[in-house]
Amino acid sequence: MRRFIFLVGIALFYLGCEDVIEVEVPSSEPRLSIDANFNLFTQETPLRFEGGVRLTLSSDFFEDGVPLVNDATVIITDLGSGIEYPLLYDGTTEYYRPENPAVLGNFDTEYELTIIYDSETYRGVTSFIPVAPINEVRQGTNTLFDGDETEVIVEFTDDGSRDDYYLYDFGFDIFRPLEDRFFQGEDFVFSSFYDSDDVQPGDTVTIKAYGISAQYYTYFELVIEQAGEGGGPFQSVPATTRGNMINTTNFDNYPLGYFLISEADEFELVIE
């Protein structure tokens, strides 16, 4: 157990005193945290992708910094063909990435992610999740509480042939998960707002849409709930959030994080 000391000043009548309160916070063994998001921009030639596999170790609540893992063996396997593709660590981006993004371009197969670290093997399986393209992004005139926010209005057409789940990324740690339960196969329009401290006239903002699974939709909402309003879900995974990766060597030493391959689309808007 680690002890952390908080100094609390208490004013009592005319006297000032300082009480020492000791709070015991249980230490926990670090777990492997797996941020494995591949976002494929399929409307671009050649195929472009963002993301990769970022590995860190979970830390105690009061510890500063997140320890990176850069010495793991990371492999993606196309389960349709059985071909394995090693992922190489890039110290600049802190991601493990394939040399050729085209290895993820088989949209009709399942992919398995294998990570070998500290003599233990972690595995997860996913498939390509499509997304409806963004039809339009335009600037609105509505505001929120302060009256100086900037509204952006997004429009897309849902695919009525399937159940879709979306994750919209507006930058500045602004995310909007959506499910098409109430607009199946229809045009959908919604707004998001930028704070005046983040966006000024003349700035260019980029709005990105990702296709996600129903399981990831639930996972994402748990991450946001545990992370609170002050941080994005891709900065660090809260210490109790489990995803679709398992430890096949030691089941009790389960990892945190998620493996996801998403179709992505983006739209840029110059703020007036």
Image: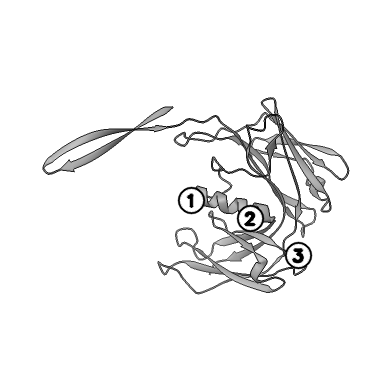
Tag nearer the camera, 3 or 1: 3
Residue matched to label 2:
217
Q: Could you say whether the residue bearing mark 2 is in a helix, strand or loop?
A: helix
Residue 162: assigned label = 3
- Dot 3 lies on which element? loop
Which quadrant of the structure image shows residue 96?
A: top right
Count the marks.
3
Tag 1 near tag 2, CB within 8 Å: no
Mark 2 neighbour class, 10 Å CA radius: few under 14, some 14 to 19, many 20 or more:
some
Kindly check if marks 2 and 3 are in contact, taking CB atoms under 8 A apart as contact. no
Q: Amino acid at mark 3?
A: Arg
Say if 122 sits above or below 104 in the image: above
Q: Amino acid at mark 2?
A: Tyr
Q: Residue at x 51, y 31 (%)?
A: 28
The part of the image, by quadrant, that contains residue 97 is top right
Report how far apart the C-alphas of labels 3 and 1 lie in the structure. 31 Å
Using the image, tell me which numbered label, if any, was put on residue 25. none
Q: Position of residue 212 (x, y in %)?
A: 68, 55
Residue 228, disc: 1
Picture coordinates of residue 80, whole percent (x, y): 87, 45
